[in-house]
């Protein structure tokens, strides 16, 4: 694989100096808005509460992060001026609202936002979650593939890394039903693996996969236990299919569960994490006591991140050492080749 100059620079911005990703997600919307709405007893979560919590996350957790994932509606307007300029900034492009059809979910971009706008807003990368089930209605799968390819093309055009997230979700025929994402206890590993296999095709332009565990985090055996080799084989297959740098998402797992997930992922070649709720959800449960939330972040979330970061330093594969780039690392296209199609005459 080769990278444009802009994508290479963006990938470096997201990682530490050794090339490992320690990224914090504060782009979640329904999990934050729903709890605030319930605690406030209002029909909608007040904007100030949602944005205020995200501002607190940025302020308290950025010191342990190499990059932060923000959403355009709440985290970006409240956090862009306080985000450490040494950190990478990822902006999410998918709307948290999706269309539920009998055959599966359809994703869409946030209204009035685009890859170009993320570039102008100072983003170092674009993140998109595409709801995908390989066993969904073929027309739904085709629509989701087209949605992803369109964003991948835009990321190529504007030379921004494309951070791509996949999550298994319930179809109408499944026993587990939820619109707010909760990791499915009944998900089959093949649903995860086949989804990644579909989007590993170069035509989608994915630079960094953000992936879930092929086994529910609550069912993942302890490393070294009897079932560990079978679990590790699934993670190894996940990394092989991805075929490029990848990080783990927490999928709402508990702190101990997510750390266990990372043990397997790093043994399989993952380059870090991009996680949210495993880090800050326990502290958030104290809402609306802002002082208690802040104390929880400082006393629990920050030490937890330091532990994850130590594990990442010890065991994760630097992204630029991924086998997809060859033994000499990424081959970077000259700037004039990277930008000539965007800015005619560049380098002349």
Image (cartoon, rainbow, N blue to C red):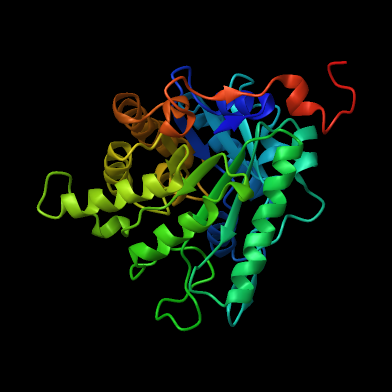
**Closer to us: 35 or 120:** 120
Q: Nearer the viewer, residue 25 or 287?
A: 25
The residue sitting at 55% across, 28% down in the picture is 14
Q: Nearer the viewer, residue 257 or 207?
A: 207
User: Can see residue 95?
Assistant: no
Q: Quadrant of the C terminus?
A: top right
Q: Nearer the viewer, residue 201 or 12?
A: 201
31 w.r.t. 19: above or below: below
**Of all residues shown, which one is farthest toward the left?**
226
**Looking at the rendering, which quadrant does residue 339 occupy?**
top right
Residue displayed at 73% across by 55% down: 110
Side (left or right) of 324 relative to 117:
left
Position above or below: 83 against 140: above
Q: Horizontally, is 244 left or right of 218 in the view? A: right
Q: Position of residue 192 (x, y in %)?
A: 41, 60
Q: Quadrant of residue 111?
A: bottom right
Residue 195 position within the rendered picture, expressed as x and y whole percent measured from the top left: 48, 60
Residue drawn at 17 percent across, 48 percent down: 222
């Amino acid at each position: 694989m080769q990278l444009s100059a802009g994508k290479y620079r963006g990938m470096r911005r997201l990682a530490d100096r050794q090339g490992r990703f320690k990224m914090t997600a504060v782009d979640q919307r329904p999990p934050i808005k729903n709890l605030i709405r319930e605690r406030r007893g209002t029909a909608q979560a007040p904007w100030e509460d949602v944005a205020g919590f995200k501002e607190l996350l940025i302020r308290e957790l950025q010191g342990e992060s190499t990059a932060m994932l923000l959403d355009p509606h709440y985290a970006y307007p409240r956090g862009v001026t306080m985000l450490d300029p040494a950190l990478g900034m990822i902006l999410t492009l998918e709307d948290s609202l999706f269309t539920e059809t009998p055959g599966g979910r359809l994703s869409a971009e946030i209204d009035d936002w685009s890859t170009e706008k993320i570039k102008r807003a100072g983003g170092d990368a674009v993140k998109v979650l595409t709801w995908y089930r390989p066993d969904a209605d073929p027309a739904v799968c085709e629509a989701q593939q087209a949605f992803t390819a369109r964003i991948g093309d835009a990321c190529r055009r504007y030379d921004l890394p494309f951070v791509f997230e996949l999550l298994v979700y319930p179809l109408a025929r499944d026993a587990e039903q939820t619109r707010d994402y909760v990791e499915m206890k009944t998900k089959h590993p093949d649903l995860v693996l086949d989804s990644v296999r579909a989007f590993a095709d170069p035509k989608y332009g994915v630079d960094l996969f953000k992936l879930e565990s092929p086994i529910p985090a609550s069912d993942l055996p302890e490393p070294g236990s009897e079932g560990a080799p079978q679990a590790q084989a699934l993670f190894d297959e996940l990394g092989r299919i991805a075929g490029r740098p990848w990080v783990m998402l927490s999928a709402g797992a508990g702190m101990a569960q997510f750390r266990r997930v990372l043990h397997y992922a790093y043994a399989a070649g993952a380059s870090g994490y991009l996680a949210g709720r495993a880090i800050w959800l326990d502290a958030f449960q104290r809402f609306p006591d802002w002082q208690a939330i802040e104390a929880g972040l400082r006393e629990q979330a920050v030490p937890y991140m330091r532990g994850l970061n130590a594990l990442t330093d010890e065991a994760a594969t630097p992204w630029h050492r991924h086998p997809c780039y060859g033994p000499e690392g990424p081959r970077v296209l000259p700037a004039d080749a990277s930008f000539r199609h965007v800015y005619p005459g560049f380098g002349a």
